[in-house]
């Protein structure tokens, strides 16, 4: 049985940092391209960042480039999203999934809430 679980969300002040984790059981994340997505209330889900299985290359949405960093720890079967210089507009539920494209992703986590507020 495959399980993908996000963690690390919470409340942060503007300018603060959080690190999200995406851990899996039943699959080896290193074999997958992993994407982070987010959905704010009343808005469509958007891709935030992606790390490819083929070469480890990463990509970022313009809105987070330079502030967020995606990485893998294969020994822990975990993908991270380090979020720095957080802004109120980063408030959303964050999901990880097994593709850069949400319509292709086979496995999804349940999401973790990130709230950026003073």
Image (spheres, rainbow, N blue to C red):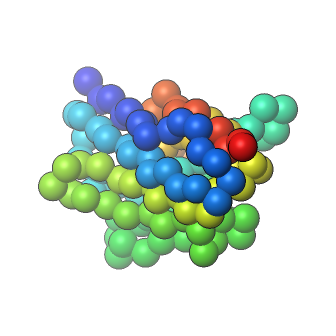
The residue sitting at the left extreme is: 75
Q: Is residue 80 above or below residue 116?
A: below
Give x and y (percent) for residue 93.
62, 36
Q: Looking at the image, which residue is at 38% across and 46% down?
A: 21
User: How far from the left and from the top, in percent, is residue 31?
Assistant: 28, 56
Give the answer, above or below, for where 108 lies relative to 12: above
In this rendering, the count of numbered labels is 0
Task: Give the quarter of the figure containing the N terminus.
Answer: top left
Comparing 110 with 97, the one in front is 110
Residue under the image location 49 percent in, 51 percent down:
18
The relative height of residue 58 versus residue 33 in the rendered view (above or below) is: below
Q: Quadrant of residue 67?
A: bottom right
Q: Residue furthest front?
A: 118
Image location of residue 12, percent across then percent down: 59, 45
Q: Can see residue 46?
A: no
Instruction: Give whichever of 41, 11 is nearer the camera.
Output: 11
Q: Residue at x 53, y 36 (%)?
A: 10
Percent across and percent down for residue 92 are 67, 39
Please tell me which residue is depicted at 53% across the width and 55% down the height of the picture: 17
Q: Image quadrant for the C terminus? A: top right
Residue that sits furthest to the top in the current view: 1
Look at the image and tell me whether residue 1 can be seen.
yes
């Amino acid at each position: 049985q495959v399980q993908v679980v996000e963690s690390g969300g919470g409340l942060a002040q503007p300018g603060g940092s959080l690190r999200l984790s995406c851990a899996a059981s039943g699959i080896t994340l290193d074999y997958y391209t992993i994407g982070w997505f987010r959905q704010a209330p009343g808005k469509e889900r958007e891709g935030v960042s992606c790390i490819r299985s083929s070469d480890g290359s990463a990509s970022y949405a313009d809105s987070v480039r330079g502030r967020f960093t995606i990485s893998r720890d294969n020994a822990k079967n975990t993908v991270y999203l380090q979020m720095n210089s957080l802004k109120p507009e980063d408030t959303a539920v964050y999901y990880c999934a097994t593709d850069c494209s949400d319509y292709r992703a086979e496995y999804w986590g349940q999401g973790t809430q990130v709230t950026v507020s003073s």
